[in-house]
Amino acid sequence: MASNYASEFRTCGTTGLKVHLPAERLFYVNAVTAVVALLVGGIMAILIALTRWPAVHLLPADLFYRFLTAHGLNMLVFWIVFFEMAGLLFASTAVLGSRLPAPWFGWLNFCLMLVGALITNYMVFMGQADVLFTSYPPLKAHPHYYLGIILFAVGTLLACFHFMATLVIAKKEGYHKGSYPLFTFGILIAVILAIFTLLMGAATYLPTWLWAMGLIDGINPAMYRLGFWGFGHSAQQINLAAMVSIWYLIGTLSVGAVPINEKFSRGAFLLYLLGINVASVHHLLVDPGLSATYRIFNTSYILYAATIGSMIHAFSIPAAIEVAQRAKGFTNGMFEWLTKAPWGNPAFAGMALSIVIFGFGGGVTGVTQGVEQINIMSHNTLRIPGHFHVTVVGGTTLAFMALTFYVLPLVMRRELIGKSFAKYQPWIFAIGICIMSTGMSFAGILGVPRRHYDVTFSSAIFQVPFSATATTMLGLLGLGAIIAFTGLLIFCLIAALTAFFGKRIPPNMELHHPPHIGEDSASVAPAQA
Amino acid sequence: MSVFVPEKYWWKPLGPDERLWLWVCVATAVVLSLMMPLYNLLGHQNPSHESYQITPEKFNELTEKFVSENTVREEIVKQKFGATEIEKKIPVVRPALGVKDVYLRARAWEFYPILELEEGREYRVHMSSMDYQHGFSLQPQNINFQILAGYDLVVTLVPRESGEFYVICNEYCAIGHHTMIGKIIVKNKEE
Ligand code: HEM
Ligand SMILES: [Cu+2]
Ligand SMILES: [Cu+2]
């Protein structure tokens, strides 16, 4: 049965993975769209960051809020999700050596997502949806804004089902035997989380859409917030599971790391599934409506169950890398395995920085701000963006960028353009984001609100004197943003130039390396980008 | 490898260091989980506020009644709109003796009225919105609450320090968001 499709496959010369060509084309369009979204979001980012820096105060007020909306959407939703769709395709087809059950279906859901993203962006840039990405009612956008998001979400949901279908046929048609590889397992967890999340999103966006069209009367703002964060926070768990899977993947591709104990790592992924998607009430800690008992239950017992999961990965990934490095002979002292790691490989450096930034920066800020009593002092201040720019940007985005440095040569079969820039890219981006988040966090601790056009209150009835320290911190925000934006531009340039003009690596149809089923893994050559 | 099929029987006991780390994780989680509820019992600054449902009309009525019964003077403020400057009068409200319930109304783009409170006296501050979602952010204390239309959020507080404090809106409430600001004055008993 499987052999009917043999002509649709090629074999990757470096990893020995069998790649289904129709899946590869879909992978390609998803990844390219993701990078375009990243670039749009990045241009918005530098403009709003330079506005929040009081000494520069670049944009007029209406454009500031409009571009902030565009930044949130293009980054958090479109860049991240399109990239994850590419990840789903890779995890289900290439890693399992399977074919994609219905390429036309993949194109259908890609088109839905693309059309949705275009409609939403159009409404935002036309000034019909200055509601920020949270669109809290009774702020109302043009109905097409919500329609675009719904189309995008439907496309994503269909892609999740397609992923599941691929897992089924991979077994049924004999492409794959045994347990799923850890990477696919992690992505499977992300997909299950995504299905839950998208249903929650539907329950939130559908009524809001009807309301925007005038078909129903009003949306209860407290219910909306509960629903929105049931969706919006769970969505971050998808990103978390995807990011951790990518850490394992890059560990394997760069130094040949093997998970030391599959049970340990898989158990940690399961904790994400069981625990973390319920913790979304930490967005509502100082809201009216819910009882204190419920808020505390939801954000403590259940939140920390998932923290255990992340702490386990924080142990087992570096451990796997250490073991692999020691096996290569880097055994001098405590840390030769680390100092002799392939730091010049942007994928490895990006992954390592992503682990450190997410683990220390994101973990510490998240666990503290999720505490009710600390949340009182941080809710809606710049401390919040200070937190999530070290999770979803310094963590997830950096990991996705790092993986791209493998995707380009391995999947797109193009030789990297600008290798010497690539080497520094993760560092520039990481340092910029860390400086920016530090500025945001401390400004927030001093009371500076997020999503705010003018903290000098020049057109208000009172002028609140924020301290000189707070203003300095906003300057730090601006400085970090410039550095991070430089890193982002280098990334987008390398990705675009390589994807379109990179020298083709000849397709390698010969099996140099063992196929993926049950073979000795140590013989896979570590790829140096 | 993470992209390759694991060996058939991967369900293996944890090594000693993995076991140790797991216990460290569990202990951390337990400590963190206990902190929040414990602080609710032992600490003094908890957001375990009360909240009630109320229509904006009703809340507005209560605020107007509170203002008309307790206003002590008016403060004249200036606001710039581009080149033009306008003047506004805002009532300063000092709750009479025995009045414990205090109302603060959020509306695009003002907090109403200006409150004048006494140091050391206990108040129940009611907050609600007439329209968009707003944020109550007391500066420089940096204490923050979410204000929603249809909900009355009640914070019980005792001012401990005299002076002038500002309430800035820290939830985006459309284009005038950054102009939305209110004031709370705290006086000594004698003043
Ligand atoms: C060069 C990189 C980036 C810079 C300089 C940057 C800068 C900023 C700034 C200045 C804000 C506004 C904070 C405020 O006023 O409240 C912001 C908000 C935000 N950023 Fe970024 N950012 C970057 C990358 C990203 C990425 C990659 C993501 C997501 C994956 C992201 C997600 C967000 C979100 C969700 C918001 C909140 C929007 C809102 O409050 O409505 N950012 N960013
Ligand atoms: Cu407001
Ligand atoms: Cu506001």
Image (tube, coloured by chain):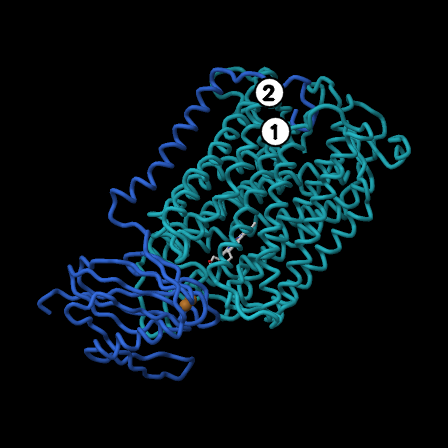
Residue A327 position, x and y percent, is: 60, 16
Identify the element where label 2 is drawn: helix
Nearest the viewer among A349 and A150 is A150
Q: Which mark, by number, is residue A251?
A: 1
* Disc 2 and disc 1 on one polypeptide chain: yes
The amino acid type found where label 1 is placed reads Gly
Q: CA distance from mark 2 to mark 1?
A: 9 Å
Would you say the beta carbon of the disc 2 residue lies within 8 angstroms of ligand 1? no
Residue A285 position, x and y percent, is: 40, 51
Q: At 58% across and 16% down in the image, what residue appears?
A: B12
Task: Reply above or below: B18 against A482.
Answer: above
User: Quick one: quadrant of the N terminus of chain A?
Assistant: top right
Nearest the viewer among A213 and A97 is A213
Residue A280 position, x and y percent, is: 48, 47
Q: Chain of mark 2?
A: A
Task: Reply above or below: A225 against A425.
Answer: below
Identify the element where label 1 is drawn: helix
Sequence-earlier tag: 2 or 1: 1
Please state if B36 lies on the left or on the right of B149 as rendered. Answer: left
Per the rendering, the colour in which chain B appears is blue
Q: Which mark, by number, is residue A49?
A: none
User: Pointer 2: what residue?
Assistant: A324
Per the rendering, the colour in which chain A appears is cyan
Q: Chain of mark 1?
A: A
Dots 2, 1 in contact, CB < 8 A: yes
The amino acid type found where label 2 is placed reads Ala
Task: Reply above or below: A287 against A250.
Answer: below
